[in-house]
Image (tube, helix red, strand yellow):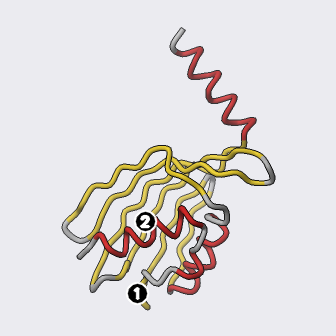
Amino acid sequence: MADAPVDAFLTAVRHATIPDADVWSEDAVLDATVPNWRFSIRGPEAIRAEYARWFAHPSRFEALERTPLPDGELVEYVLTWEEDGMPHAGHHLHRLRVRDARIVADTVFCGGRWPASLLAEMEEAAQGAHA
């Protein structure tokens, strides 16, 4: 069942419980494109450590779209959370490959972490575009 590890991953993201997530295979690879950078890491411990930094606060999905693929799932979301008393958001797209009920590859595109001030700027720009 390809969606079980993806469900568990998304639950861990939402609840900020990545260190407890047991969803990656021993040979799993994370290929991440983040603002102005790209990197790859291997193995569940390294992936958990990286994602524990990304998803350190309980959050909610403002938008979530999941598309089944023959070998996994395409997941796009807008995530919101509070950090140091300030609202934040992020936009990610994951191409997750699953084998034997484990995530074996995660190619992720991250738009960055947006604090409240930048979210307000984006909202203002959106309103101006629709005026």
Q: Please name the residue shown 50% across and 44% down the image.
A: 62
Q: Which SS class for mark 2?
A: strand
Q: Please name the residue shown 66% across and 35% down the image.
A: 119
Q: Answer few, some or many: residues within 10 Å of disc 1's Cα (few below 14, many 20 plus, some between 14 and 19).
A: some
Q: Answer few, some or many: residues within 10 Å of disc 2's Cα (few below 14, many 20 plus, some between 14 and 19).
A: some
Residue that sits furthest to the bottom in the current view: 26
Residue that sits furthest to the right in the current view: 84
Residue for badge 2: 107
| On-image quarter of the C terminus | top right
Q: Please name the residue shown 60% across and 80% down the image.
A: 19
Quick one: label 2 or label 1, which is nearer the N terminus?
A: 1
Residue that sits furthest to the top in the current view: 131
- On screen, residue 42 versus residue 35, left or right, reads left
Mark 2 against mark 1, which lies toward the viewer?
Answer: 1
- The kind of residue on which mark 1 rests is Ser
- On screen, residue 43 versus residue 3, left or right, reads right
| On-image quarter of the N terminus | bottom left
Image spot of residue 72 (x, y percent): 28, 69
